[in-house]
Amino acid sequence: MTYKIKLGSLAYLAILAMGLQQFGLRVGTTKVDISCVIFIIFLTLYAAKIGFDKKLYILVMFLNSFWVAISYIHLHVEFVRMLVSCVWLTALLFLFSVPKINFDFNKLKVCIELVLTYTLLIFAIQTFQGASRISRLGLFDEPSYLGLVIWSAAAGYLGSILYKKNKNELLKLLLLIIWGISTLSMHAAVIVLITAAYAMQNTIKMRELRLLYLIPIVVAIFWFFVIPNLDINHFLERLDFSNPSNLSLLSWLRGLDQAIYASKNSFLLGFGPGSTGQFDFPSIYTEMLELRRHGRLNLEDAYSGLFRLSIEIGIVAVSIITAVVLKIFFLNSHRGSNGASNQSMFILWFSFALFIGIMIKEPTYSRSYVFVSAFLLGQFCKSGYLKTPMN
């Protein structure tokens, strides 16, 4: 039990390090976040002292053998690139499968709030120093990564409020929405999508929240403080699919073309880990990017976790992953779930929102938020801690 407590402390530390991406390790062309390193140490110690189910070891051996075979069949992947991708996918599978170690949801939430706190402080300092928008990152590597964590935390507070009214949580939600908008991150979509997913499972009635009197306050804040400073064109050019010119949108659309090509040519199995960007495929967006001298922009990651996984492990595996995560959310987000609390709802919605954002536009396996999302969702999956009782 003492050993499990020590391992639990290591997991808390990994979550605390989520926002320290600029201190990550450079291994060849791959940037490995500190959080990922700590999680890998956590997995190594867990496997050495406690061990996983034998069935999991068999599954991992089968999957890696299968992936290697697929990669050689298609001849699209360099061995080192394939090996590295296999290692990351295997680590994520093990992390998702770690048995519950009695984590305190309140402590997990505090860890995430501490990440937000030190990130906000550094962000504020950078703002007062006159840093440009793309330089106001806290200690994240890119504005997109910062935006994903901010909007996922906002989704976490929304889930907490929907479970049980809490004025302090509402104020934090409003602060994060304003902060998130200031980053101009398209990850604002995650809070819309997760709310839609929740609405599919539960009928939301505003009177249940007892927060109707706050609507005029929210509207006033947005009207006087947010909208006047909002660069609408920044968002519109990223959503103009009819005449795309933004580099991010062009890269995303090319990633879609790449995923479609891989699905047509290897629908069930994919082309193997590491195969993204390693084969020729038709796409008008490649020419458009080359005209802008960005021909290889996001070519090797497809700009989207969904696209990359579809290319590398196939549509069937991606469908299974998505179905499992949706089941975790639907089973545990119910208002009557056993053992539920504001803290547990925050963690559930936060980790699910991270997953949504990763699938939309964050394809790199070795990033802190990917490991954090896999770990937290896995805790809900196995424990049945918040599982809705059967009628």
Image (cartoon, helix red, strand yellow):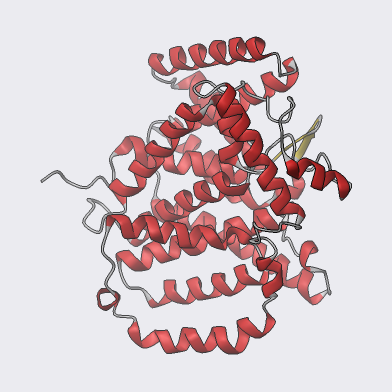
Relative to 144, residue 179 above or below: below
Across and down, in percent, residue 252 comes to 67, 47
Q: Residue furthest left?
A: 391
Left/right of residue 245 with respect to residue 95 in the rendered view: right
Q: Could you tell me which residue is drawn at 80 percent across and 62 percent down?
A: 135
**Residue 256's spot in the image, x, y percent?**
62, 41
Kindly identify the residue that appears in the image at 57 percent across and 48 percent down.
Answer: 360
Nearest the camera: 32 or 352? 352
Q: Residue at x 31, y 37 (%)?
A: 383
Q: Is residue 56 visible?
A: yes
Q: Quadrant of the N terminus?
A: top left
Is residue 207 placed above or below 360 in the rendered structure? below
Residue at 50% across, 72% down: 172
**Residue toward you, 235 or 349:** 235
Q: Where in the figure is residue 98, as x and y percent of width and height? A: 43, 31
The answer to which image quadrant residue 312 occupies is top right
